[in-house]
Amino acid sequence: MIESLKWLEGFDHKKTNFSLHQALLLQISSAIEQGELKAGEKLPTHRQLASLLGIAVATVTKVYKEAERKGLIIGKVGKGSFISSCPVLPHAIKANDLKSINLSIIKPQVNISNKQLTDQIKQLSEQSQLSDLMDYNMAGGSLTDHQAAIHWLSTQGVLLEGKKVSICSGAQHGLMVLMNTLTEYGDCIAVEEFCYPGIISLAEQFGRKLIPVAMDDEGMNPKSLENAIAQYDIRLIIVVASHQNPTASVMSIKRRKAIADIVIKHDIWLVDDDVYGFLSPELPAISNLAPEHGFYLSSLSKCIFPGLRVGFIVFPEAFKQRIEATIRNTIWMPVPLTLAIAAKLIFSGQALAIQHQQRDIACKRQVIARHIFNDDELLVNIRSQMNSFHLWLILPEYWRSEDFSKVLEERGVLVSNADYFKVKSTAINSKATKVLNSFTPHSAVRISLMAAKSEDELKFALHLIKKLLKERAKNLPNIR
């Protein structure tokens, strides 16, 4: 049986200026953006689509491969091709090509540190033979690189006693390494019900079952976590305790201890995804509170430069061989040149200075956002911290998050809607859904305040968002 092909209605590549495979790829991409193809929906087989369109099977194969490379679809051996759980990501990253103001991806301000980066690269070229940094490094980083990693982690308040440190290629790679080291195909992993889409994508790719745990204003709820553990064979918990993506929630010390106690009580592994921990340095890493069960993960991507692709995994010594083998099997080694640049920035003290500067900018931009949205007519609720890189804008009940983000995109501003982060688990049954019911509204969007190139650009984009909210409110006078 061929799946619904409504998304193909009117398709005729001869009416476009594109080649056949380019036009078909564009048709798939457009259907996803317009909601005609939804996450998890199955596509026709290569032969079915080729037969329907009267084209070669090889052409369809080429299109599907390209769509998978772009993150639009995912192929499952023996099952077929499906729309990805987070097909918006490639679109969001390429927002500059669309000449939009991109507030849909969280990143630091890279332009503020150009001089420091230039100076360190210049010094590196003068003090080192750069060709040595283009060779294999079998140890996954030099002694200097590992010393830099330990020095950096010590400035972040991470417990290192009795632990080992490995360097990975950014936090996303670190998540992949830990997921594959600590779990097997079909295992259940507990995550926040709204979580970083990279986790959703990894679980889908490697056949892990995500169990969404209800959240409150401090993030993952301990009682709901206990309920999930009682119903499912949870092997791993992934949690973001500081400035959670997307809700910006921050766990208190009491909440961190409660989660850590549950981990210890049930003897479950914990991945502490602490990429935003630097924004709340006064709070301990949650993995510090469960040292024998905790795996700490962070990177330089959010606090320094996304392009460095340098991440750090801190773990119990017994896992050294397995984690390093997984790193070697996936990337062979972190890139020596970027490690050398990172080490220069860390040992010079400039990395820490840049991190503090990023935090200061975030505080200023939060003030700007709150000033603009401080309007009773908007009927919105903002969840964030005064030093977060982003905010979670809960929309009035008459707005669906997907509709809101689409209308906003038409006006030149990109944000990420709540559906992008929502965990949809095939392991959840109706009874469990009631048990894990959450206070978190589904109609919301995440707005990255740090993505705008300047404060003026940010103000312009936020005023556009405010204008859209007020326009709709005026057209619905009886909503109060």
Image (tube, helix red, strand yellow):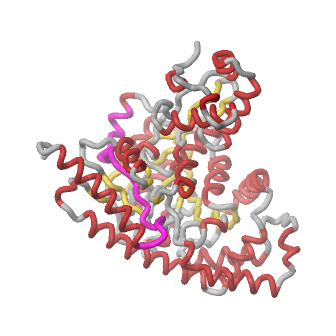
Q: Position of residue 127 (x, y in %)?
A: 81, 87
- Seen from the viewer's position, the closer of residues 10 and 304 is 10
Residue drawn 64% across the image and 40% down it: 206
Which region shows up in magenta?
A: 432-455
In the image, residue 439 lies in the stretch drawn in magenta:
yes
Q: Is residue 325 left or right of residue 21?
A: right
- Seen from the viewer's position, the closer of residues 374 and 153 is 374
Residue 460: image quadrant is bottom left
> Compared to 265, does 128 lie above or below?
below
- Seen from the viewer's position, the closer of residues 208 and 237 is 208
> Compared to 275, does 186 lie above or below?
above
Residue 328: image quadrant is bottom right
Q: Position of residue 202 (x, y in %)?
A: 60, 45
Residue drawn 75% across the image and 76% down it: 340
Q: Is residue 125 visible?
A: yes
In the image, residue 380 lies in the stretch drawn in magenta:
no
Q: Position of residue 102 (x, y in %)?
A: 48, 58
